[in-house]
Image (cartoon, rainbow, N blue to C red):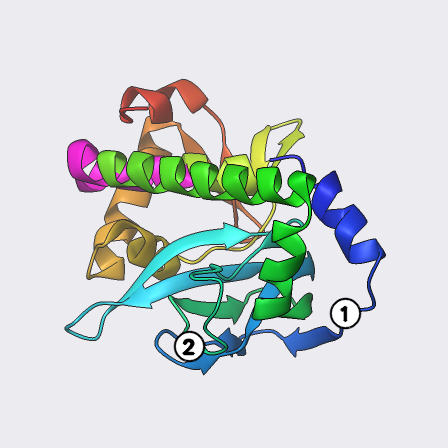
Amino acid sequence: MDSHVLQEYLDKHSFPIVVKKKRTYLTYEGLQDRYAYILKSGIIKTSVISPDGREFNLRYINSLEIVSLLRDEYSQFIDAPFNIRIESDQAELYQIDRVQFWKDINQSKELQMYVKDYYRVRLMYSMKKMQQMLMNGKFGAVCTQIYELYDTFGVQIEDGLLVDFVVTNEEIAHFCGITSASSVNRMMQQLKDLGAIKIQDRKIVITDMDILKDNIIL
């Protein structure tokens, strides 16, 4: 998505900025809210709660992006579609009245195109994620998540590809729909034994991307 259109829109207005600290929540699934939020800086995580009370992680977001779905154009209050939790030391988010945001979108062809692209990309991501979860099995799901973490936080270093963000095995389990972090521990050890990854300062370093890709249906 071309975020410069969104940035230009934000630069033309003086929207309030919400600052949240690490491990705090911006919204909870099902909680009514009258605002749309756009990430300005920091890292957040979206997640949903299953009927049996387990948390299922959706994705990390670390760049300028709408982080709360817009839903319909007219309701002043809507139920938040998922949890949004701060994962960096702090995060800054633009807070925009959602009805006013829709009015502005409808008056700007550039914003309309951005929002259409936003929903298209999110839909394609959700479909691909579902396919990977269903077809890869648990080990493949873990490999898929590590690949996705690299796609979001990856940095080239001398020893390989660094996921430059600390992600626990428990969090990986929540991304993959695996109930036990110990299961992820075993699969991470298997990947280490295969020479695919290593852990450096609590961060994942991918030392052989081909091994990961061999276990992923992309």
Q: In the drawing, does residue 9 fall left or right of residue 129?
A: right
**Residue 125 falls in image quadrant:** top left
- Relative to 83, is 169 above or below? above
Q: What segment carries the magenta color?
A: 133-146
Evaluate if marks 1 and 2 touch, with contact meaning CB atoms under 8 Å apart.
no
- Residue designated by label 1: 15
Specify the principal SS of the magenta part. helix
Whole-percent x, y for residue 155 in the image: 64, 34
Q: Residue at x 34, y 61 (%)?
A: 170
**Residue 21 falls in image quadrant:** bottom right
Q: Mark 1 or 2 closer to N-term?
A: 1
Q: Is residue 145 magenta?
A: yes
Whole-percent x, y for residue 209 in the image: 44, 23
- Relative to 134, is 61 above or below? below
Q: Is residue 23 visible?
A: yes
Q: Residue at x 44, y 37 (%)?
A: 120
Give, as a three-letter code, the residue at label 2. Answer: Tyr
Whole-percent x, y for residue 35 in the image: 57, 73
Query: Which of the two discs, 1 and 2, sits closer to the camera?
Result: 1
Observer-nearest of 115 and 30: 115
Q: Looking at the figure, which quarter contains the C terminus?
A: top left
- Residue designated by label 2: 28
Observer-nearest of 129 and 166: 129
Q: In the drawing, does residue 169 fall left or right of residue 206?
A: left
Q: In the drawing, does residue 140 fall left or right of residue 31?
A: left
Q: Residue at x 37, y 73 (%)?
A: 29
Residue 183 disc label: none
Observer-nearest of 117 and 154: 117
For label 2, the SS is loop
